[in-house]
Amino acid sequence: MSGQLKPATINLERLRDIYLAIGGTAFVLVLDGQTDSATAALVKKLDKDNPDIKTTPPHWLRRRIVELASSAAEPATKPPKTPKKEPKGKKLGLTPERKELATGLKAKTINLQKARALWLEAGETSFTLVLAGLTDKQTLALATKVDKDNREFKAAPPECCRQRIAGLASGAAEPVFKNILENEALEAALARPSMAK
């Protein structure tokens, strides 16, 4: 009888016919006489989309065959495909206005004055939403354009850069201005001894 339960020649309908013909007790005895590998191969054929069959012990596989044969269970259905992750920087479908805003923020000619004009035109919600959709590299580039003397951007996390850009664009913050004493040429001139004596 175990010769009838070979993966190459069996399908679910045939398995159920055998179960009905010999009865549940005899069917279980036939399964107990099979090797573990033969049982695993049979379950893989009849219940191929079941994620549990790869990790469960042989006694569970035998019980699963009995459930399928007795019609107490149906084969597992294939799980739905998970949607692919959207590429970073393209999280949301943007409206035409927001696409235009994103283009403006990524422009080579962007500066603080233009960023503030975009903030006023788009509003806080749209501006911050589009800003959040920029990649980390785009965010750093924008931050250094609107606050060019701020040296903290290179070490700051992208979210801090986004907050700084939003603060500058809204007028809640002002850009960092380079301290005149940090000018290397001026420092060198001050360090030279005076010629007049």
Image (spheres, helix red, strand yellow):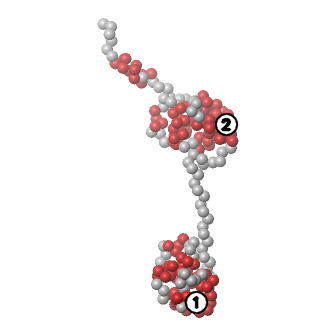
SS state under label 1: helix
Q: Position of residue 178 (x, y in %)?
A: 47, 25
Q: Identify the residue under disc 1.
A: 24
Looking at the rendered structure, the kind of residue marked 2 is Ala
Residue neighbourhood size for the residue with mark 2, other residues' Cα within 10 Å, grouped as few (<14), some (14–19), many (≥20): some
Question: Which of 102 and 174 lies nearest the eye of the viewer?
Answer: 102
Residue drawn at the location 60% of the way across and 47% of the way down: 90
- Outermost residue on the front side: it is 8
Residue 9 higher or lower than 86, as above or below: below
Q: Tag 2's secondary structure?
A: helix
Q: Position of residue 195 (x, y in %)?
A: 32, 10
* Residue in the image at 46% along x and 35% along y: 152
Q: Position of residue 104 (x, y in %)?
A: 62, 35
Question: Which of the 4 image quarters holds residue 120?
Answer: top right
Which image quarter is the N terminus in? Answer: bottom right
The residue identified by callout 2 is 122
The location of residue 117, given as percent across then percent down, is 64, 31
Query: Looking at the image, can residue 130 be seen?
Result: yes
Vertical placement of residue 195 versus 148, above or below: above
Which residue is at 34% across, 18% downward? 191
Q: CA distance from mark 2 to mark 1?
A: 71 Å
In the drawing, does residue 128 fall left or right of residue 183?
Answer: right
Quarter of the view holding residue 8: bottom right
